[in-house]
Image (spheres, rainbow, N blue to C red):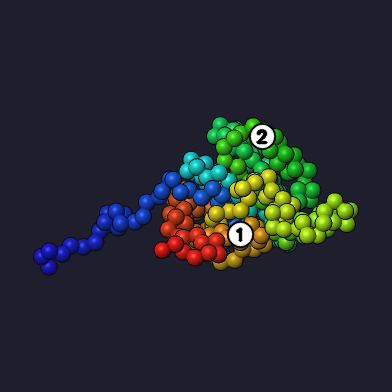
Amino acid sequence: MEGKRLFSKKDAAKSAPALDRERIPGHIAIIMDGNGRWAQKRHLPRVAGHKQGMQTVKTITMAASRLGVKVLTLYAFSTENWKRPSSEVNYLMQLPIRFFSTFVPDLVKNNVRVMVMGDLSRLPEKTQTAVNEAIADTADCTGMVLNFALNYGSRDEITRAVTAIATEVKQGTLKPDQVNGALIDRHLMTAPLGDLADPDLLIRTSGEERISNFLLWQLAYSELEFVPEHWPDFNAESLERAIIEFQGRHRRFGGLKNE
């Protein structure tokens, strides 16, 4: 009909919201889910998905750093992941060694500092060495913090914090009425991140809609996004789409929306 035309992909691109580089979330946390399912869909062993997922970590780290993200926290291995088959766990324990041996020079070049939180004492000695060397090698970097949650579980983290606080109360160095949210913050594993300890945005890949014992205290007011891509398929464009979605929300932190 005259006067009408089809709505083209070019029109859709024009109408889609654009990324606002002035409102990039300071702290993004990601639950990297779907490596095994990505591999199974391709009739590959699960470890092939973990190997590809490691490449995605490199891609997303560089993309987040270029966008101006200040902290990127990645859920690499949970306290519950020990329940997986020993062959898979052993492979996962080798990944930090392979990752840091090839990627630390790029991190230093891009001024990215490595931080790791979790109970590292249970990790194999070679894995601990690789982690500690990466932390030391990037200690002078002042750009984005790449924070790995490795053998981490939020309930374990909170239990450790409560135990430490209870010990201080018992020793008389702390009074019960001094226990408040700020004090608990200082006893959590994210304390070194200071004002950036709480993620602005949590992304979980692979379509699952749960938090899986990750940053339960810190996520109190975070925006949550559950995206369909398996982690090995998540890329720089996926990250930008998630940030655009985040930018379209109004964070009220328990208050009322300003009219």
Relative horizontal placement of residue 58, taking residue 212 as reference (left or right): left
> Which label's residue is closer to the chain start, 2 or 1?
2
**At 42% from the left edge and 58% from the top edge, which residue is drawn?**
248
Going by the picture, which residue comes out furthest to the right?
Answer: 171
Relative horizontal placement of residue 70, taking residue 148 as reference (left or right): left
**At 54% from the left edge and 34% from the top edge, which residue is drawn?**
110
Q: Quadrant of residue 32?
A: bottom right
Residue 181: x %, y % from top left? 69, 57
- The residue tagged 1 is 219
Q: What separation in Å lies between label 2 and label 1 (alpha carbons)? A: 27 Å
115 above or below 111?
A: below
**At 21% from the left edge and 62% from the top edge, which residue is drawn?**
6
Q: Nearer the viewer, residue 170 or 136?
A: 170
- Is residue 45 visible in the rendered image? The answer is no
**Residue type marked 1:** Leu
Residue 52: x %, y % from top left? 56, 49
Relative horizontal placement of residue 61, taking residue 21 as reference (left or right): right
Question: Which type of secondary structure does the marked residue at label 2 adopt?
Answer: loop
180 above or below 236?
A: below
Q: Quadrant of the N terminus?
A: bottom left
The local crowd at label 2, few if under 14, some if 14 to 19, many if 20 or more residues have their Cα within 10 Å, is: some
Q: Quadrant of residue 115?
A: top right
The local crowd at label 1, few if under 14, some if 14 to 19, many if 20 or more residues have their Cα within 10 Å, is: some
**Residue type marked 2:** Ala
Residue 53 - label = none
Question: Which type of secondary structure does the marked residue at label 1 adopt?
Answer: loop
Residue 139 - label = 2
